[in-house]
Image (cartoon, rainbow, N blue to C red):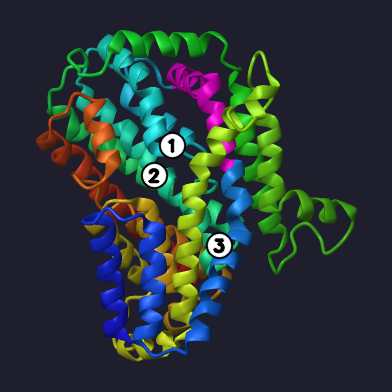
Amino acid sequence: MVYALILSIAFIIFATAKLKMHPFLALLIAAFGYGIAVQMPLEDIVKAVNEGFGGTIGYIGIVIIAGTIIGTFLEKTGGAIRLAKSTLKLTGEKNVPATMSIMGFVVSIPVFCDSGFVILSALNKALTKKAGITLASTAIALSLGLYATHTMVPPTPGPIAAAGIIGADLGQVIMYGLITASIACFVGWIFAVTYASKIKISPDASGVDEKAAAAQMDALEKDAPCVFSALLPILLPIVLIVLNSIAKYPSHPFGEGGQALTLLNFFGQPVVALLIGVALAMLLPKNFETKMMSGSGWVGEAIVAAATIIIITGSGGAFGKVLQKSNIAAEIGGMLKDYNLGIWLPFIIAAAIKTAQGSSTVAIITTASLITPLLAVLGLDAEIAKALVVVAIGAGAMVVSHANDSYFWVVTQFSNMEAKDGFKLQTLGTLIEGTAAMITIWLISLYVL
């Protein structure tokens, strides 16, 4: 079974990285191939694939779509830019790296990190030029800030998908994800102001049309919502989900019954909380038009963007269910009993897959599928442990961003970096940030597990 698993992982990496096969197909082929290789009954393979695919999507499909819609409305209305400029007022114009790091951290909770970088790039260059500092420092601060929450904090699709596959409580994932991402983001900022600041990159020369980007930013900011309105669709769903998780603690901090608790349980469900966020996001446009909700409008764009994540997540769930049904956990458990890897194992697997094939989302989903059958063997099947596993997978999915990662090229191309600068900054920075995140998770685990 172990050899079949190794071959399956190698196939997924080779198919997605070298053959450019869509992860959906690669994961499904791996699921069927693994099942056949370990001589599972053919009917059981089909049943496991259907159960894994449908069960996973049923749990997180709507949540991913809702989160993507919120991000799209923030992007289209200029809410993200408004948040960035407001953060600048708090940090001061001389602390541009800190501004971009914080802004990246907030924006990437609902917005994909590559989209967030593109949205904020023109503002970053303008602030960098005004402050008279190197673009290397501010660009990498923004990049690492975005990456911290992109891989570890729902409602970003990757962590939601992992939570769905593993069966982790989303509120606890958010809590531990925010703690870990905050420390990782701080480490990323330190890297930006100490190491990246020594590499001189001008914010002027660029292959990107700076005037067009600046004009687009100004147009968005003109009708952008206020800071409170822009933050509300992000923060309110998170608060509701976290409160619902706290209410379920054995100590029952909010009591054991009553109408208020019933309402909190309803509104704190991830689907309901994120749909409330969608409703608030639809209040952001200055001139709301019903076509924004159409198939060709903003909602339609968001659903198309979310569809890819959902089907990859579903196929990852299918692969995981086949692994689970094959009883591979017992075999690997026997091999691992003499190695005290614990919470480090999901990080190592995710880091290996991420480095090999480039996509953080594929690394997160594949690792979640692989690790789920092993949770009991590793002693990580408690609720808190499952949440920490999801965050550990996200930390591994940062390590490392290099030439096979599309985000690497977004950062370098929008920041006037040559490839060698990208390796010094983006690749090294994600290695340091991801490792710092994992050390944080490990330290947390020593106290809560």
Specify the amino acid type for callout 1: Phe
> Is 203 in the magenta?
no
Which residue is outermost to the front? 42
Image spot of residue 321 (x, y percent): 50, 75
Q: Single out the mark in the foreground, 2 or 3.
A: 3
Q: Answer few, some or many: residues within 10 Å of disc 1's Cα (few below 14, many 20 plus, some between 14 and 19).
A: many
Q: Is residue 374 left or right of residue 239?
A: left
Q: Answer few, some or many: residues within 10 Å of disc 3's Cα (few below 14, many 20 plus, some between 14 and 19).
A: many
In space, the residues marked 3 and 1 are separated at their CA atoms by 23 Å
Q: Give the residue at mark 2.
A: 148
Highlighted range, magenta: 67-90
In the displayed structure, would residue 53 be above or below residue 287?
A: below
Q: Main secondary structure of the magenta part?
A: helix
In space, the residues marked 2 and 1 are separated at their CA atoms by 6 Å
Q: Residue at x 32, y 12 (%)?
A: 126
Q: Give the residue at mark 1.
A: 105
Q: Give the residue at mark 3.
A: 164
Regarding mark 2 in the picture, which secondary structure is present there? helix
Q: Is residue 182 visible?
A: no
Which residue is outermost to the right? 259
Q: Nearer the viewer, residue 359 or 384?
A: 359
Q: Is residue 116 visible?
A: yes
Disc 2 + disc 1, Cβ < 8 Å: yes
Specify the amino acid type for callout 2: Ala
